[in-house]
C-alpha cells in the first residue's frame, strides 16, 4: 500500500508541475496517435 504522505509529496513535486506545463502549452501533450505506429512504419 502507498503511504499517503509520500503520494502527496510526489503529486506536489512531479505531477503538479507537469500538469501546469501542459495547461500552459497543450501542444506538448502526447496523444495515443503520436505514440502508436503501424508495422510498416516500424519496419521502415
Image (tube, grey):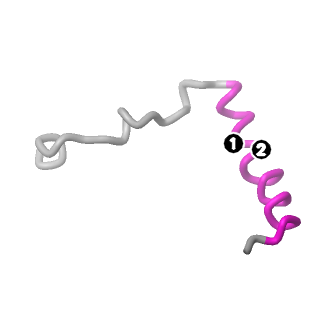
Q: Which residues are magenta?
A: 3-24
* Residue at image location 11% in from the left, 42% down from the top: 40
**Viewer-proximal residue, 15 or 4?**
4
- What is the secondary structure assignment of the residue under circle 1? helix
Give yes or no for contact between labels 1 and 2 (Cβ–Cβ under 8 Å).
yes
Mark 2 is surrounded, within 10 Å at the Cα level, by few (under 14), some (14 to 19) or many (20 or more) other residues, namely: few
- Left or right side of 28 for 22: right
Figure label count: 2
Query: Residue tagged by mark 1?
Result: 18
35 relative to 2, above or below? above
In what quadrant of the picture does the C terminus appear?
A: top left
Q: Residue furthest bottom?
A: 1
13 relative to 36, above or below? below
Specify the principal SS of the magenta part. Answer: helix
Where is residue 21? Give x, y as percent.
Answer: 69, 34
Where is residue 13? Give x, y as percent.
Answer: 80, 54
Question: Which quadrant holds residue 16?
Answer: top right
- Left or right side of 21 for 10: right
- Distance between the alpha carbons at the discs numbered 1 and 2: 5 Å
1 relative to 5, above or below? below
Which circle marks residue 36 in the picture?
none
* Residue at image location 40% in from the left, 37% down from the top: 32
Mark 1 is surrounded, within 10 Å at the Cα level, by few (under 14), some (14 to 19) or many (20 or more) other residues, namely: some
* Residue at image location 19% in from the left, 40% down from the top: 38
| Magenta-colored stretch includes residue 37 | no
Where is residue 43? Give x, y as percent.
Answer: 12, 49
In what quadrant of the picture does the N terminus appear?
A: bottom right
16 relative to 4, above or below? above
Q: Residue furthest front?
A: 1
Query: Residue tagged by mark 2?
Result: 16
- Left or right side of 21 for 11: right
Amino acid at each position: 500500500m502507498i503511504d499517503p504522505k509520500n503520494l502527496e509529496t510526489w503529486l506536489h513535486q512531479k505531477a503538479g508541475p507537469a500538469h501546469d506545463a501542459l495547461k500552459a502549452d497543450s501542444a506538448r501533450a502526447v496523444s495515443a496517435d503520436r505514440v502508436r505506429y503501424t508495422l510498416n512504419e516500424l519496419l521502415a
